[in-house]
Amino acid sequence: MVEELVLDETELEDAHLTEDDHIRSSLAEADASGHPGFPGEAVRRMHARRDDDCYPRKQLFRFDRVRADGEILHPYAGRREDEKWVICFYLPFTEAWGEMPEAEFIRLPVSTTADLRKRALRLTTGSAPTDTDQ
């Protein structure tokens, strides 16, 4: 018998027949996405906060969000402030750190590949993207 496993759309996109297929797919995605990646110090800081984190909705950290100004927010931890949660995030294009109330963060749209490309274009051209930028 084989256990049935249900995959969501993100997990399904990450399913590959071989490890080589997975590596090739990951490299192609990285080349096309425009994401700047994470410097080592940022990864260390995010990982340190996750280790001692007691945030109950960790699945919220699976997806980056995009602010109205087009900035990409990478959530990595949550902390309690009074009776509410605050989400800690990293901004990969500016290498800055921020926080916002969980309720406000959840209302932001999930970042798409198009959002990453628009933000990357703004970084290289120094101007704000238009609706026609892809």
Image (tube, rainbow, N blue to C red):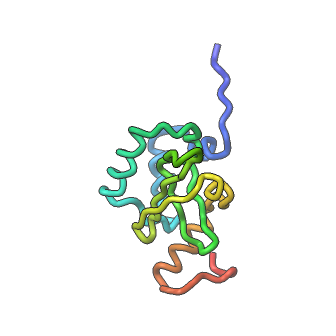
Instruction: Name the image quarter holding residue 83.
Output: top right
> In the picture provided, is 113 more to the left or to the right than 88?
right
Q: Residue at x 50, y 57 (%)?
A: 74
Q: Residue at x 59, y 40 (%)?
A: 57
Q: Nearer the viewer, residue 134 or 102?
A: 102
Q: Position of residue 90 (x, y in %)?
A: 45, 60
Q: Nearer the viewer, residue 42 or 30?
A: 42
Q: Position of residue 106 (x, y in %)?
A: 65, 54
Report if residue 134 is visible in the image.
Answer: yes
Q: Residue at x 55, y 70 (%)?
A: 71
How many numbered marks does the figure carry?
Answer: 0
Report if residue 15 is visible in the image.
Answer: no
Residue at the farthest top position: 1
Q: Which part of the image, by quadrant, shows the N terminus?
A: top right
Above-or-below relation of 1 to 76: above
Q: Nearer the viewer, residue 80 or 4?
A: 80
Q: Nearer the viewer, residue 131 or 100?
A: 100
Q: Position of residue 117 (x, y in %)?
A: 56, 71
